[in-house]
Amino acid sequence: MENGKKKIIIGLRPFILGGLLVLFASGILIFVKGSNFSEGNSSDAEGRKNESEESMNENLDADDDGLPDRIEKNIGTNFEKNDTDGDGYADFTEVKNGYSPFVSGAEGKLSAEELEIMKEKIKNADKDLYEKIFGDIKNSILPDSLAAPAVSLDLPIALSGPAVFKEEISLSNKNWKYSFYAPCDIDMNKEHSLLIGLHGFEGNAKDYIKFWQSDADKNGFLAAALQAYPKTYPSGSTVESYPWLEISDFANAVLANIQKKYKIDENKIFLTGYSAGASSAYIIALDGDIKFRGVIPIDGYLPLEAGILDKLSKARDVNFYVVHGANNEAADEAVNQEKILLQYGAKMEFKILPGLGHEYPAAEHENILKWMNGLEIEKIDAKE
């Protein structure tokens, strides 16, 4: 914006038509006649060659966001970055739903005039793409809560990513936060699996949930990641962590909040955590308020000092998929602690990954998902 006026970047695109040099700019055709462009001229042949090459490359999409590079150059978005404003929504997604790819979050809602300008620029550049984006606007791929932002005192909602929302819950006079992900094509009339995750020390919920987004898309489950919050120690130092005495209440509140909008199959709720988040996941699982179909602690340990000794009996028949890096010096000790759960009837599968230290094993997701899907099938067969 300059002096209260919108700054519009017009991209010129030259091509040859009937011996004329034609400049295309935001729907305006400018014809320039000259002997160098007459039919039969050698430069005309070169022009046809260039046009052919351009035609071959007209659908190049370097950042794979759904908008061809030539369109992004025309409207001014970054064709090498699928999310120009960095709010987590791809440029195509924002444009389709009437949001600015230059302004992050719900604040980027375009006015009717701004939307028409955007639509006109795309329509003039590529009618087929225009139809693809705006031809069936009722099939919006963003959640209703974004298309018509509704903020309540109890549940303030702020946009944080593709179909991802960071939500705040008022509970016990605390504002606990979590990020939530729902695949774009989710069927609101069906029950769905839910994965609840807890990030590691110095991590955050938004980044942690991104580990699971593509898996959620492929497997059709919902995902929520709990955000650790500041804890001040007697020394005066403050770090973000999960207070063990309250972590189960936090998880219960998140589940209840999600169930207000989505149908959750209570037989298909999974729990995972990394590092300190894995230790907190053990506490949530052993509190027993939520019946998890499976629990996936990654590079954590069973925190016996957290007052859970009298809750170990609740581990009976709970499915655990425990992951550790072989090069993590604390792995052996952690596994010995975790094996205590076997004595209380837990079903545990241990995966010690060679070559890894204390780092997140994203490559193990494929095996984790197979395990999760196997448990779901097992549950269905048991019902039958």
Image: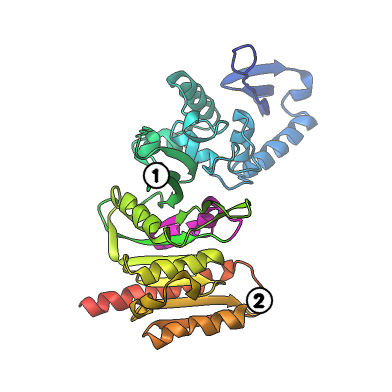
Where, by quadrant of the figure, is residue 98 drawn? Answer: top left
Which comes sooner in the sequence, label 2 or label 1? Answer: 1
Where, by quadrant of the figure, is residue 141 drawn? Answer: top left
- In the shown orientation, is residue 19 left or right of residue 383? right
At mark 2, the secondary structure is loop
Number of numbered discs present?
Answer: 2
Do the numbered discs 2 and 1 sit on residues whose CB atoms are within 8 Å?
Answer: no
Q: Nearer the viewer, residue 310 or 323?
A: 310
Q: Is residue 219 magenta?
A: yes
Dividing the image into 4 quarters, which one contains the C terminus? bottom left
Cα gap from disc 2 to disc 1, whole angstroms? 38 Å
Q: Amino acid at mark 1?
A: Asn
| Colour logic | rainbow
Check the image and report above or below for 319 versus 278: below
Check the image and report above or below for 106 versus 200: above
The answer to whether residue 129 of the structure is visible from this angle is no
Q: Nearer the viewer, residue 330 or 88?
A: 330
Check the image and report above or below for 213 versus 371: above
Q: Which residue is mark 2?
A: 328
Range drawn in magenta:
201-224
